[in-house]
Image (cartoon, rainbow, N blue to C red):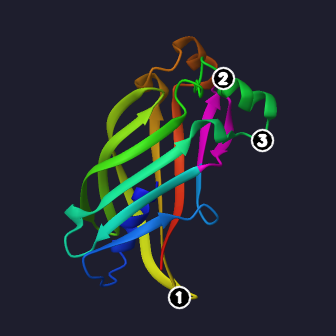
């Protein structure tokens, strides 16, 4: 997610020498999701413990890098019993797979942002995904440089080894929304 942040900052057209390093700002960022329940309603949630960094080379975006780490047991759907169930082996299995991670492998500029391809690991399975990062203008506030971005993506839980018996009631596809700010001094 922080990886996405940097891509969008470059879209703002601010000139910077070489690569700038940004840290994920957990106070002004969020990683949330929604998934269908019985194909009649949506269950919404978020992850409360997310970290990441990115280096952004505005002169040569292909040299930019992005990484994001989510602590899977920080899942929060505003229902304590459901959250505990989602941490169990038939869903996230947070004891065996404590993190969800993204590491970029390529970055290219697109109109209004960046296309970032990388390795996404969840539930012990790694797949290559491409994120489209939009937004991203740099803002200097109280001598701290900030960049923000947004992206949405759909992931199939069946692509990541989730218990197929549990996919039916909740649905296979989860929609992920990422709104991030990155900071550098």
Q: In this view, does 157 lie to the left or right of 89?
A: left
Q: Is mark 2 on a helix, strand or loop?
A: loop
Closer to the chain start, of discs 3 and 1, is 3
Task: Look at the numbered disc 1 and give the secondary structure of its residue.
Answer: loop
**Magenta stretch mostly in which secondary structure?**
strand
Asked whether 153 falls inside the magenta stretch, the response is no
In the rendering, at what x and y percent does residue 63 appear?
Answer: 22, 63
* Numbered circle sitting on residue 143: 1
Do the CB atoms of the residues marked 1 and 2 lie less than 8 Å apart? Answer: no
* Above or below, comparing residue 160 to residue 181 in the picture: above
Task: Find disc 2 in the rendering and name its residue.
Answer: 38
Position of residue 136 measured from the top left corner of the image (x, y, whole percent)? 42, 71
Residue bearing the label numbered 3 = 78
Q: Distance between the residues labelled 2 and 3?
A: 19 Å
Residue 23 percent location from the top left of the image: 48, 65
10 Å neighbourhood of mark 3: few (<14), some, or many (≥20)? few
Q: Is residue 135 left or right of residue 85?
A: left
Around disc 1, counting alpha carbons within 10 Å, would you say few (fewer than 14), some (14 to 19), or many (20 or more)?
Answer: few
Tell me where the magenta segment starts and ends, as one range: 32-49
């Amino acid at each position: 997610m922080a990886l996405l942040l940097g891509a969008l900052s470059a879209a703002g057209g601010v000139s910077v020498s070489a690569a700038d390093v940004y840290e994920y700002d957990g106070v002004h960022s969020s990683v949330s999701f929604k998934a269908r329940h019985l194909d009649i309603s949506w269950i919404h949630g978020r992850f409360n413990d997310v970290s990441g960094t990115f280096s952004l080379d505005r002169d040569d975006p292909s040299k930019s890098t992005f990484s994001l780490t989510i602590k899977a047991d920080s899942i929060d759907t505003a229902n304590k019993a459901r959250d505990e169930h989602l941490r169990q082996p038939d869903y996230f299995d947070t004891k065996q797979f404590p993190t969800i991670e993204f590491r970029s492998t390529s970055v290219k500029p697109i109109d209004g942002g960046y296309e970032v391809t990388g390795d996404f690991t969840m539930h012990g399975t790694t797949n290559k995904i491409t994120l489209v990062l939009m937004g991203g203008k740099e803002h200097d506030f109280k001598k701290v440089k900030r960049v923000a971005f947004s992206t949405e993506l759909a992931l199939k839980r069946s692509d990541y080894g989730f218990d197929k018996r549990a996919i039916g009631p909740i649905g296979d596809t989860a929609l992920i929304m990422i709104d991030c700010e990155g900071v550098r001094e």
